[in-house]
């Protein structure tokens, strides 16, 4: 049962992220679901954007810096055009 609950939680987070276009909204979603780990935030943003990773990430970047970069990519929003056309 916990696996289903976890899966439902991830699905809900991704659905909420998908309709969010502002940094404040995204931060509120992560706060609501108590997501604090930058790596988890990155994974959820990427799941929503339907990408495995982004290119040109320096090897010595911290998780917090990588999250900040992913958040900017997410907010910029051009990924939305790719997800809509791929469906």
Image (tube, grey):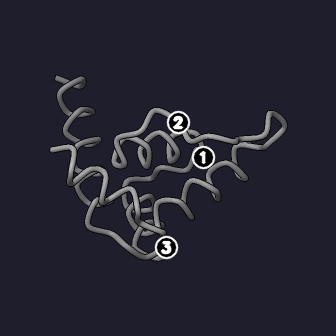
Residue 35: image location, x then y, percent = 47, 49
Q: Nearer the viewer, residue 75 or 29?
A: 75
Counting residues from the N terminus, which is met first, the one under dot 2 or under dot 3? Answer: 3
* 58 with respect to 53 (left or right): right
Q: Residue furthest right?
A: 60
Which residue position is annotated with label 1? 38
Residue drawn at the location 26% of the way across and 67% of the way down:
19
**How far from the left and from the top, in percent, is residue 75?**
47, 68
Rendered residue at 27%/50% (across/down): 83
- Residue 59 in the image: above or below residue 68: above
Q: Residues within 10 Å of mark 1 (few under 14, many from 20)?
A: some
Q: Which residue is mark 2?
A: 53
For discs 2 and 3, the disc positioned in front in the rendered view: 2
- Out of 66 and 77, give the one closest to the viewer: 77
**Picture coordinates of residue 16, whole percent (x, y):** 26, 60
Which type of secondary structure does the marked residue at label 3 adopt? Answer: helix
Quarter location, residue 31: bottom left
Mark 3, residue position: 23
Q: Is residue 45 left or right of residue 61?
A: left
The mark lying in front, picked from 1 and 2, is 2
> Does dot 2 land on a helix, a strand or a loop?
loop
**Residue 47 location, x and y as percent?**
36, 41
- Distance between the alpha carbons at the discs numbered 1 and 2: 14 Å
Tell me where residue 25 sits by quadrant.
Answer: bottom left
Q: How many marks?
A: 3
Q: CA distance from mark 3 to mark 1?
A: 15 Å
- Give the distance between the C-alpha atoms of the residues marked 2 and 3, in whole angstroms: 20 Å
User: Nearest the camera: 38 or 57?
Assistant: 57
């Amino acid at each position: 049962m916990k696996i289903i609950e976890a899966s439902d939680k991830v699905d809900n987070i991704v659905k909420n992220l998908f309709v969010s276009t502002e940094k404040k909204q995204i931060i509120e979603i992560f706060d609501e679901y108590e997501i604090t780990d930058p790596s988890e935030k990155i994974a959820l943003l990427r799941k929503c954007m339907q990408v495995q990773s982004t290119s040109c990430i320096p090897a010595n970047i911290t998780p917090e810096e990588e999250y900040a970069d992913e958040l900017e990519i997410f907010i910029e929003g051009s990924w939305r055009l790719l997800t809509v056309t791929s469906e």
